[in-house]
Amino acid sequence: MLDKKQLDEYRQDITFTETLCEQTLSYHSTWGIFSPREIDAGTKLLMKYIKIQANDDCLDLGCGYGPIGLTMAKLAPKGETLLVDKDFMAVEYSNKNAKANKISNATAMLSNGFQHVNKSKRFNVIASNVPAKVGKEMMSLMLHDAHERLKADGKLYLVTVNGLRQYMKRNLKETFGNYKKIKQGSAYTIHLAIKNTEKTV
């Protein structure tokens, strides 16, 4: 049986430092949030291939404690980055990490997909580390809402487990009219779709 000292340790914030896209940030996380002790492999792969301009407005969909969104905010200091998650603890820790890293152009808020995102807000880049068990209904809502909320030529970057590769290709082509597989690793695939282009792969 665990003693009080061990339980108290579990209640303390987990802290670590990680570099993504040449941006080194310190992170606070806690048990119960996805991959609390380190940045997961899917996110690391995604951030090797994402392209962000300095004035981009960005959205991190399903932000966890914020590694994707906060890195995008650092890469786009002239834009605004919104981080959303349906888990209130993820939102709390994303905002805590934005403050700790002095990132003033990033805000996290509670939302199930795009449900609570201002309908008039448009983004240059939307990125998401998609949970393997998100469900086809929620996935359909996410993809269609992402297409609607992107600016012209806006980009949607997704990382999924390889088992969802063909599903994502089919559904992104259907929703966006185009699809590009950026990278397939041993476990994860990076997908890209662009709004209002004629590119097909």
Image (cartoon, rainbow, N blue to C red):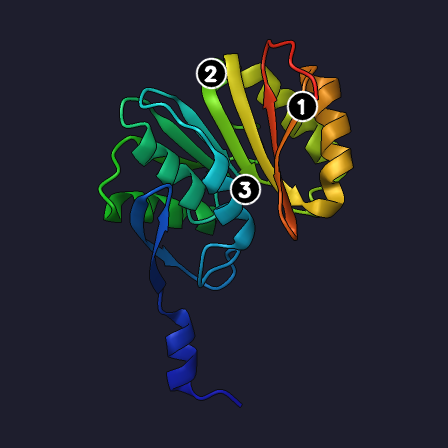
- Which residue is under mark 3? 86
Q: Identify the residue at image location x=44%, y=41%.
A: 68
Is residue 9 shown above or below 199? Answer: below
Left or right: where 160 falls relative to 17? right
Which secondary structure, mark 3? loop
Is residue 128 shown above or below 44? Answer: above
Is residue 103 shown above or below 153? Answer: below
Residue 106 in view here: no
Mark 2 neighbour density, 10 Å: few (under 14) some (14–19) many (20 or more): many
Front residue of 97/11: it is 97
Front residue of 155/88: it is 155
Q: CA distance from mark 1 to mark 2?
A: 21 Å
- Which residue is under mark 1? 179
Q: Amino acid at mark 3?
A: Lys
Query: Mark 3 or mark 2: which is in front?
Result: 2
- Which residue is under mark 2? 122
Front residue of 162/176: it is 162
Q: Quadrant of residue 159?
A: top right
Instruction: Give the mark nearer the N terminus: 3 vs 2.
Output: 3
Instruction: Give the mark nearer the N terminus: 1 vs 2.
Output: 2
Q: Amino acid at mark 1?
A: Tyr
Q: Identify the residue at image location x=60%, y=10%.
A: 197
Residues at marks 1 and 3 touching, judged by CB atoms closer than 8 Å:
no
Is residue 75 shown above or below 67? Answer: above
Q: CA distance from mark 1 to mark 3?
A: 27 Å
Q: Identify the residue at image location x=26%, y=44%.
A: 99
Q: CA distance from mark 3 to mark 2?
A: 20 Å
> Where is residue 137 drawn, in percent x and y?
75, 33
Q: Amino acid at mark 2?
A: Arg
Instruction: Give the mark nearer the N terminus: 1 vs 3.
Output: 3
